[in-house]
Image (cartoon, rainbow, N blue to C red):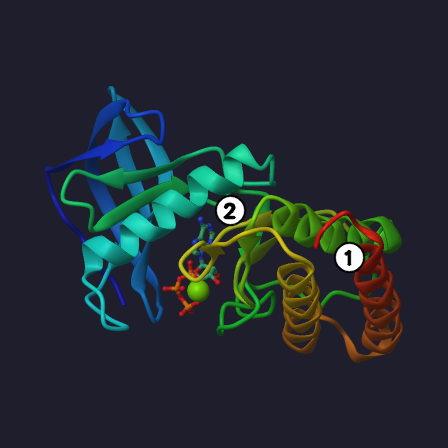
Amino acid sequence: MGNAIENKNITFKKDTGRETVVGVISEIQINQGSYSTIFDSIVDVAGHKKRFIIKKYKDTMGASAAKNADKAFKNYSLAKKAGLKIFPTFRVSENKKNILMTTGFSNGQICVGSNNDITVTELGRPLICEIQNVDKFLSDFFNEHLKAAKHGIRFWIDVFFFILSRNEPTKIDFVVGDLDNSAEMEPSKSIGLRNMEYARTTLIAFCEKNINTNFAYKFREKVEAYYEQGVNAVNASELN
Ligand SMILES: Nc1ncnc2c1ncn2[C@@H]1O[C@H](COP(=O)(O)OP(=O)(O)OP(=O)(O)O)[C@@H](O)[C@H]1O
Ligand SMILES: [Mg+2]
């Protein structure tokens, strides 16, 4: 579904408070989510054309669009302070209804979540047959969830996006991409354990949609092993 806008200027504010005016040159809708509609956009920033994602929030889940976007924005700030792997840009518009963020897409790179139809095959790439340094990838993924819990961030099952290279099919990384459903809480073991569950659920959903069946079994086995390690790490941590 396409949707083009001409000469539309929006003021976006950074978590540091700094404001930038951005001219939206074009936008293509890529997803209709529960909180927002997502656009792959070309914008003009100080005379330079750049590709960003714009999330246009909706009045939903008993809250206004502005409240939903502001929650995501505040969660981004928390995730940044906690030193989590976030996208470098995440800004909220003046009317608080839109978020401008770094895109996970570029010429050589694609981005998928785990809870919708945007999958590697949908983006024109074959299913994943192998992941380089898969143990490090999984261990880092569960650790990120523990780190969040230690900083009082309760994640959800759709927080992480996976970044893949078009030319290096075994290369993969993760990034905190969707902060709509996360919440700030007192750090506790219980949040730690919930985050471990979410990490496991995310990886299983990601595997179902994006990993070749020949590799999926091995991947799932490893997910279970690292999930167990993650639970042990929470239980052995200083969290109460
Ligand atoms: N910055 C981004 N870069 C690349 N892709 C993105 C980006 N933001 C969102 N997407 C794509 O759009 C999908 C939905 O985004 P997101 O989860 O943030 O919105 P949502 O409203 O919560 O949608 P849903 O209800 O499907 O979770 C993601 O899974 C991802 O595929
Ligand atoms: Mg989501």
**Residue in view at x 25 percent, y 20 percent:** 46
Q: Residue furthest top?
A: 46
* Amino acid bearing label 2: Gly
Say if residue 55 shows up in the picture: no
Per the image, label 2 sits on a secondary structure element best described as: loop
Q: Earlier in the sequence, mark 1 or mark 2?
A: 2
- Please tell me which residue is depicted at 76% across the width and 74% down the height of the picture: 212
Ligand 1, by image quadrant, is bottom left
Where in the figure is residue 205, as x and y percent of width and height?
64, 75
**Disc count in the image?**
2
**Residue 65 placement, left or right of 53:** left
Q: Which mark is residue 104?
A: 2
Instruction: State the SS at label 1.
Output: helix
Give the image location of residue 92, x and y in percent.
27, 40
Q: Position of residue 194 (x, y in %)?
A: 64, 67
Between the residue at mark 1 and the residue at mark 2, the CA separation in whole angstroms equals: 30 Å
Q: Quadrant of the C terminus?
A: bottom right
Please tell me which residue lies in front, 14 or 116. Answer: 14
Task: Give residue 234's mark.
Answer: 1
In the image, taking residue 112 as reference, residue 73 lies left or right, namely left
Q: Position of residue 95 (x, y in %)?
A: 14, 44
**Amino acid under label 1?**
Val
Query: Quarter of the image holding residue 64?
Result: bottom left
Q: Name the residue at 44% across, 54% down.
A: 179
Closer to the camera in the image, 11 or 187: 187
User: Hey, which quadrant is residue 206 in on the image?
Assistant: bottom right
